[in-house]
Image (tube, rainbow, N blue to C red):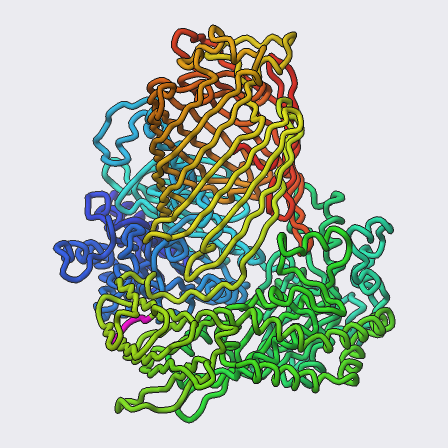
Amino acid sequence: MVKKVGLLLSILWMAATLQAQDSIVQRVLLIGDAGEINLHQKEVLTAAAGKILPSKTRVLFLGDNIYPRGMSLPGQSNRTETEQIIEAQYTPMIAKGAPVYFIPGNHDWDRMGKNGLAKIREQAAFINHQNNPLLHFVPSGGCPGPVEIPVNDRLVIIAFDSEWWLFPHNKENDSCNCTTKDEFMEALASLANKNQHKTILLAAHHPFQSYGAHGGYFQLKDHLFPLTNLNKNLYIPLPVIGSLYPFLRTALPNPEDQMHPAYKEMIAEVDSVFARNQNVIHIAGHEHGLQFIQNQQIQIVSGAGAKNAYVKKGKGSRFASPRSGFVMVDQLTDYSLRLTYYYLDNDKIAQAYTDKIPFVAQTKLEAALNNSPLLQQDSVVVKAAPELDKVSKAHRKWFGENYRKEWAADTKLPVLKLSQLHRGLTPTQQGGGLQTKSLRLVDAAGKEWVLRNVVKNMEFLLPEQVRETFAKDVIMDALSAQHPYSALIVPPLANAAGVPHTNPVIGVVAPDKNLGIYSGDFIDRICLLEEREPLGKSDNTPKMYKTLKQDNDNTVDTAVYFKARLLDLLIGDWDRHEDQWRWAYKKDKKDNKRYEPVPRDRDQVLHVVDGVFPAIASSRSLMPRLHDFGGTIKKINEYFTAGSKINANFFNQYDYEQWMQLTNAFIGNITDSVLEDALQRLPESSYRIRHDQLLKQFKERRDHLPGAMATYYRFFNRIVDIQTSDKNEWVQITDTAKGGLLVSIHKISKSGKTDQELFHRVFDPAVTKELRLFIHDGDDSVVIRNTTPIKLRIVGQKDSKDYLVENSKKHIRIYGKNKGVTINGDSGKVWAHLRSDSANTSYLPTNLYNRTQYLPNVAINRDDGLMLGLSVRFINQSFRKTPYGNLQELSFRHAFSTGAYHFGIKSEWLHALGKADMVVNAQLYAPDNTQNFFGLGNNTEYDKNKGIRYYRSRFTLLEVMPQLRWRKDGGASFSIAPLFQMYSLDQDDNAGRLITTPSFVRSYDSSTISNTKYYTGVHLAYTKDARNNRLLPSSGGYFNITIQGFKGLNAYSRNFAQATTEMSVYKKLDPRGVFVISDRLGGGATFGNAPFYQSLFLGGQDNLLGFRQYRFAGEQLLYNNFRVRVKLLDIASYILPGQLGLAGFFDAGKVWAKGYNSNTIHTGVGGGVYFSPAQLFVVQVLAGYSKEGWLPYVSLGFRF
């Protein structure tokens, strides 16, 4: 009987098991961070293999497949060991017939080391070398992906390499389909749209949500025993000091932590792609634990394949465990997903948690499709944005009349019915940003089209909290400077000029089933529809550059590009950056490409700069790239700033005669009838409003083109770049009979003979001052005979480079590799820079745009009163130096309350001595320089009855410091400098003040105050600036330590040294950075005898608001500043972007002086408002309160 019961129970159990398996459509096993052979890994892998269902299971290893630094390179001693680590993972899985997919993690990329790309390729090659169809490495070695892994008609896995996004070193990989973030995002968007009706398992190594160390969450052990992060057995108690580790890791995150800007950028960009997909589950490893988080997005973390670490439950957490284990995802017959978490419990794998994710059907458009009146109409009358014309006369004066009438006019537009246009248009992927939504579509013939909004959604640039306030009206007003229908006028002008173009149609989009998940962004909206590739197949700008570089048989029709830029100038389309060009091509019989430029995205055509504020903003000092469409062409040299790199490649082929011939031919084709035809393309309402004005302006601009282009010719040709290809070429640089310099470039055939001429131009020394020849890969020869004053720089890359210098008036600078460079002839005229590093041979386009900035210097405080000044900054460009070659700044400031003056000079020359920058600072505080001094000590008296004048000291101070500075990646720098200082005080000018009473001064020089002092010394400083934004930081940190030693040069000057340091951290409390807290800790110490004016000071704007400037003086100093910043609104537009907000603070600090110490900690509290116009500077108005009363402060810039 017992046996029968047992048999019955066995049959029932087997039946239940089979029934459960029958309800499982597909299974995916998720194992992360399993790259170390240990007992935990063995248990996890064995248990996971036991869950494999035949023909229904896929296994995903979610990165960090090989600890500690990925697959060893060939020849390294531990190569076999690293191979065994990855073999141990896939062997039990493929033995059960399950496909296995390895996704790379940060440890696989050499733990973010310089060999990352090589090691990823080695790991991929090893997997591929197994020749097993069940084994996959996705994405392929060193590529970002994305990779689509189809499961069935309702489930798909999309995998990408998240470490590729974060990796800081070289990751160039010609074998990848996507080589840039933009290309990756386009491909990801395409897959998101393609799989919109499926559940998407979005697989990467890095989680988008986590409550572990990578998410900024730490356990008590991290604070008490921080050394266990280096070695799990180092349980050495370090309370307080131990808290520095989690604090610094949060404040100064590395790219592997979610707080880092690059990590945040990745999350934001990828999330934006899947915002409309209903069924997206993020799966990742990285954190060494198991988590299930369900907030606005769903996150599965399975990173405990071989390691385990602290994770906690947070907002949205359904499950969290620090134990080793894995996750099993089952797709059921109702398309829902069942999650089962397994972890190691008492050395055995046990089920820990299960949950279910239902399948959500996509929203349908039945109501709109059945009820919209647009479906019955071919055209409709609409107002694009009538609110733009509902502003006062004063508003129009300050912000411009612009095109308000056009935006508000009743305008007849066609109805765009996508399923009926071009035999049906179907979306493939969404593009654009928060302002302009765009959608790529494909017609029945496979031709691509682009649909984009005409009315930009500029309110998305505001914080969500203020989108329904007045701020929305302010930011939307900037749209009035753009003509809503200006793109329509381009085709007739382009036809006449011989420039390829799209054929845009502007209309109102009707509801359409083809729009699917994109309906909300486009139906009932005014949109522009145009071909994406009007001439057929095309490349983007980076791919075009790459193709030209690979082979000199690939060419560009530069005359067409020249005419396209003339058209830009005529129609006022100044924002022509590289992404706004496509490059159509035709191939010859040998598969060589002949490119033709196709301009696109004509958003700025006819853009005006009207009104007082926009006119100021568009000045050369502030926003030189901002231009106005008017009858005259202003700032011609800055007109082509956008796209200047393309200009450098193609404008260099034309001498002045050819340049002007092209210009005049263009003008001849733009007849009055052509202009009239173009304006007639505008809707009737817009034509009626502004036809006469626009026609007059077009004619005037056409007449100004020759003069404008002649001016730009002289500007562009001062310094000229010339590039060769990666093929073999022969370059001849020779004098001409008329005093010019001829540059001729020929192909070298496979037989080694000179072949077709690729470049031929004579340069005029009266115009051109320098030629920069960039010779890319290949075996190249250069012959130089130059008696002109034109300077030559020649940069050669890989392979052999043979130079023959027959004659040269000036020294020739040649840059190249250590090997393969031969210099013959007059080598004494060559300055050779031969190094193996890539920076020495890289191509960096010449930046022709020197700038002059005028920066106001305004401040108000109780001590100095109103301070007004001006800084004039000259920013000059140099050869291959970024962001500039040298900077010269002259500054002046006057304090009206004290009569004090300050003059400053700052000069910087980047990489002046090798990799070292030369920086010179000189400061003169004179005449009538004034500084408060209340005596040494933490409790010095401030008797208000005596007035502040009693505590003011007047003296002259001169400081000069020439320094060498080395800048490193990540915002770090080190500097060393000699210094000189001179101090002088007039006794009569300080009569009746505290400074002339030695018993109150208390410093060593109290009896020699009036004696002139001279010092020399040395200055050492280290700075680490990891702020995400130096002007308005919302994350990251800043650290500085400065050590100075002073040597007295006369009897009144004693030797002393000082060390000061400060550290500040910034943390935004919400994703948009509306609330930002920051904290600064600083201090210093003096060694030896410092004069009174070199004391360490506490008080005022520097470190303790609420007190007078320099209120307390000491030999040691410690202070802390806490600030909270609340952003009220962002103003982001072409006119005057900026940020307005509130700030509150709490300061505390004290000083120590020998014999005058106390336990008092001084505090100050207060707040105010700040505004940052155009992201150029910050204006801050604060009020601070302390036991000594209220004090006001107005300043430019935050204190820290």
Q: What residue do we see at 43% from left, 72% from top?
A: 790
Residue 998's place in the image compared with 182, above or below, is above
Q: Is residue 818 above or below residue 1047?
A: below
In the picture, the quarter occupied by the N terminus is top left
Q: Which is nearer the eye, 753 or 99?
A: 753
- What is the quadrant of residue 126 in the picture? bottom left
**Residue at the (33%, 30%) spot, across then down:** 222
Q: Is residue 102 visible?
A: yes
Residue occupying image coordinates x 57% and y 65% = 642
Q: Nearer the viewer, residue 434 or 318?
A: 434
Question: Compared with residue 1129, is residue 765 higher up or lower down, i.e. above or below?
Answer: below
Q: Residue 1014: where, in percent of width, then height?
A: 40, 27
Q: Quadrant of residue 963?
A: top left
Quick check: 571 left or right of 837? Answer: right
Between 733 and 1179, the residue placed more toward the observer is 733
Q: Is residue 341 magenta?
A: no
- Which percent across, then down, holds residue 1133? 67, 54
In the image, 783 versus 899, the foreground residue is 899
Bounds of the magenta segment: 796-800
Residue 1075 spot, x, y in % from top left: 58, 36
Which residue is painted at 80% across and 81% down in the image? 676
> Residue 127: image x %, image y %?
25, 64
Q: Main secondary structure of the magenta part?
A: loop
- Residue 798 is inside the magenta segment: yes
- Which residue occupies the extreme bottom position in the image? 589
Asked whether residue 537 is in view, the answer is: no
Q: Is residue 1103 above or below residue 638?
A: above
Dividing the picture into quadrants, the one containing residue 231 is: top left
Compared across the picture, whether 916 is left or right of 1144 comes to left
